[in-house]
Amino acid sequence: MQWPGSAPNWIELKELYGFGSDEDALAYRQNPIDLLPEIAKAGIKLRHVVSVTNEHDTRVVSNDSNTFRAAGILSRLGSGIDLAILPPETVEPPYPTDSASVRFIVEASAGR
């Protein structure tokens, strides 16, 4: 998964993860997007609440490069993701206590 970074972000990422070079960082394969096959195989349920109008979700952390890409990969793996797409007039995502998210958590964790 990705978002537009900056030189200071890239330097900090390499320091935090202990990468010795740009190549080491680019070769890292433990990002959430890389782990989707294991997530699907384990039957882990996912829910993403996204906006198609909020600048953060459309430009900073692009839905196309992240959530929607993950949804496509999961679909090809025979799995899925519960997408809650906020209405255009919604400025902020609902809190985790919104009834739909609570229902998702209860149903997804039943029997675990």
Image (cartoon, rainbow, N blue to C red):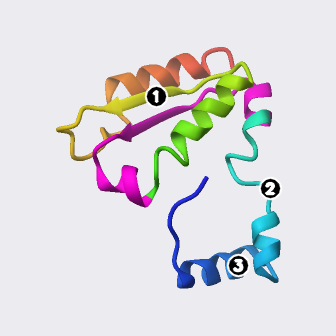
Q: Label 2 is placed on what type of residue?
A: Arg
Q: Residues within 10 Å of mark 3 (few under 14, many from 20)?
A: some
| Residue 98 rendering spot, x and y as whole percentages | 32, 30
- Looking at the rendered structure, the number of numbered marks drawn on it comes to 3
34 in relation to 17, above or below: above
| Residue 106 rendering spot, x and y as whole percentages | 51, 20
Secondary structure beneath label 1: strand
Q: Residues within 10 Å of mark 2 (few under 14, many from 20)?
A: few
Please state if 107 lies on the left or on the right of 55 as rendered.
right
Start-end of magenta stretch: 38-60
101 in relation to 6, above or below: above
Please state if 60 lies on the left or on the right of 75 as rendered.
left
Q: Label 1 is placed on what type of residue?
A: Leu
Q: Label 3 is placed on what type of residue?
A: Lys
State which quadrant residue 70 falls in: top right
Residues at discs 3 and 2 in contact (Cβ within 8 Å): no
Which residue is denoted by mark 1 in the rendering?
83
**Residue occupying image coordinates x 61% and y 23%:** 80
Whether residue 49 is in magenta: the answer is yes
71 in relation to 20, above or below: above
- Cα–Cα gap, marks 2 and 1: 25 Å
Which residue is denoted by mark 2 in the rendering?
29
Which residue is denoted by mark 3 in the rendering?
14
Secondary structure beneath label 2: loop
- Cα–Cα gap, marks 3 and 2: 14 Å
